[in-house]
Image (tube, coloured by chain):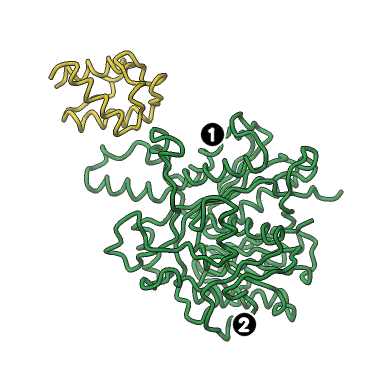
Chain colours: A green, B yellow
């Protein structure tokens, strides 16, 4: 029996580039950076003073102050993106979706802002003044629960916390749920809002972040010789995944197919990738195998491309291992150059990019790629978008912990 | 402090701290049904009252408080 195929019928996003799909795509194609000086808190004490913050979004305006103040920002963003995605898919956002619909959301660090606030209160005013909503805001599954409550999603639910691979894993596990026939529709994606003082300070401590405070928009430079770390970003992207037949029967718009998913673990080091990206290589091969796609058919790779010295070098090696001689002819780009690193929201955002690349036959660039690095010698689409017919895309996501989630998408 | 002064303080605290719409708040309004203050919200309300009026409220004292008026009377008796 052939596998049920999974399609994407709706997309919603809020991220440093824009607060909807259309403007996000326009900014990606024009090579705009969404990174800037942090405005949401005082960065005086921090070694890193910039990030990719969501702009022009007031949760109080969106959902009312009484409701908004009960949720962490990561949940505000996920509800906003989910509503867009459901409307885009032509699903009803005002009646309950019921138990034929599932939800799988990824996050790296859940409601970390709420955690930081609660600890601050505990230290200054003691345990009797801790916000009684703290637990429900900080638990990593908070967004999954809040989105489910808002839209009445009563089917299976999962929250995936594989760091920066989280929402690639979410899309992959959602695909599995549909393939296995558990449900026909799954709301899948990720959310993150870790652009907070302690979290930025802690990432800076492990020298993971770029410290280019002089030029924030040029700080994220994946595959460039002068790259010096990733840039923290916040946002949420949600996709509506459906069984192909169900979607076609209701006449839904189809962005493309989620055909391949590879999930592996390095089991090597808690932050560093295994030598040559060995775990990434296995994930990429498994995703191709799962999709039934020959490696020669992939004509665009949305790279993990974080802009850390070690990721970009190892990812390049991994791509060469998988694609061999063909590696140099594949068009690659890292859209993190423009968004920064959405952590648990990255995989879903980049799944969106993968689908839009095939829809529009345009590839967004890797911006700030001005100085070649001999260890990064593939075609990363430097600085300017290109027109290219793309039918099959691979999207890579790798996370602290050694988690690798790779997705393969097809236009038909 | 007069009862109506306590009410006015409670009202502005509900509006400013909890984001509740002004038009919903009267002495008769029910905390859970009318103001959507659930079991988690009640803990917040107690904390806000304690800070605002510099008093302590035991959980048992709250057991019978279902409306804004009952809360106002409880606070009035403790100030």
Q: Position of residue A409 (x, y in %)?
A: 72, 59
Judging by the rendered image, the residue that carries numbered circle 1 is A149
Identity of the residue drawn at 23% across and 28% down: B49
Which of the labelled discs sits on residue A6, or is there none?
Answer: none
Judging by the rendered image, the residue that carries numbered circle 2 is A377
Vertical order, A395 against A175 (above or below):
below
Chain letter of disc 1? A
Report if residue A190 is visible in the image: no
Q: Position of residue A340 (x, y in %)?
A: 49, 64
Q: Nearer the viewer, residue A182 or A14?
A: A14
Vertical order, B34 against A41 (above or below):
above
Q: Quadrant of the rendered structure where residue A133 is?
A: top left
Q: Are marks 2 and 1 on the same chain?
A: yes
Which quadrant of the rendered structure holds the C terminus of chain A?
bottom right
Q: How many marks?
A: 2
Q: Nearer the viewer, residue A265 or A212?
A: A212
The crowd level at tag 1 (other Cα within 10 Å; few <14, some 14-19, many 20+) is few
CA distance for labels 2 and 1:
47 Å
A410 sits left or right of A336 in the view: right
Chain letter of disc 2? A
Give whichever of discs 2 and 1 has the lower sequence position.
1
């Amino acid at each position: 029996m052939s596998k049920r195929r999974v399609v994407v019928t709706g997309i919603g996003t809020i991220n440093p580039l824009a607060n909807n799909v259309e403007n996000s795509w326009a900014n990606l194609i024009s090579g705009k950076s969404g990174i800037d000086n942090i405005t949401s808190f005082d960065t005086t004490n921090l070694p890193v003073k910039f990030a990719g913050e969501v702009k022009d979004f007031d949760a109080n305006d969106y959902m009312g102050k009484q409701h908004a103040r009960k949720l962490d920002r990561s949940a505000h963003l996920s509800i906003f993106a989910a509503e867009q995605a459901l409307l885009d898919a032509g699903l009803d956002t005002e009646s309950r979706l019921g138990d034929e619909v599932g939800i799988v959301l990824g996050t790296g660090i859940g409601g970390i802002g709420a955690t930081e606030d609660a600890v601050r209160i505990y230290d200054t005013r003691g345990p009797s003044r801790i916000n009684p909503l703290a637990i429900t805001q900080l638990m990593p599954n908070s967004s999954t629960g809040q989105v489910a409550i808002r839209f009445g999603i009563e089917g299976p639910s999962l929250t995936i916390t594989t760091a920066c691979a989280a929402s690639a894993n979410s899309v992959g596990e959602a695909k599995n749920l549909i393939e296995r026939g558990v449900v026909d529709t799954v709301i899948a994606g990720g959310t993150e809002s870790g652009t907070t003082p302690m979290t930025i300070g802690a990432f800076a401590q492990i020298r993971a972040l770029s410290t280019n405070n002089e030029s924030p928009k040029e700080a994220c430079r994946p595959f460039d010789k002068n790259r010096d770390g990733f840039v923290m970003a916040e946002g949420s992207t949600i996709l509506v995944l459906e069984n192909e037949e169900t979607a076609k029967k209701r006449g839904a718009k189809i962005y493309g197919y989620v055909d391949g998913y590879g999930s592996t673990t390095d089991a090597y080091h808690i932050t560093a990738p295994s030598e040559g990206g060995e775990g990434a290589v296995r994930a990429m091969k498994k995703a191709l195998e799962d999709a039934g796609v020959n490696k020669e058919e992939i004509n665009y790779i949305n790279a993990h491309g974080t802009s850390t010295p070690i990721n970009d070098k190892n990812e390049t090696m991994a791509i060469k291992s998988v694609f061999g001689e063909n590696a140099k002819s594949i068009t690659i780009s890292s859209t993190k150059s423009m968004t920064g690193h959405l952590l648990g929201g990255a995989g879903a955002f980049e799944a969106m990019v993968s689908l839009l690349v095939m829809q529009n036959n345009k590839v967004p660039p890797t911006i700030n790629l001005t100085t070649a690095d001999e260890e990064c010698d593939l075609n990363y689409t430097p600085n300017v978008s290109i027109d290219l017919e793309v039918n099959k895309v691979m999207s890579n996501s790798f996370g602290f912990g050694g988690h690798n989630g790779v997705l393969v998408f097809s236009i038909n | 402090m007069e009862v109506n002064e306590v009410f006015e303080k409670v009202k502005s605290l509900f509006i400013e701290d909890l984001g509740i719409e002004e038009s919903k708040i009267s002495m008769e309004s029910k905390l859970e049904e009318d103001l959507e203050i659930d079991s988690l919200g009640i803990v917040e309300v107690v904390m806000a009252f304690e800070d605002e009026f510099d008093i302590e409220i035991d959980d048992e004292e709250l057991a019978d408080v279902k409306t804004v008026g009952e809360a106002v009377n409880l606070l009035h008796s403790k100030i």
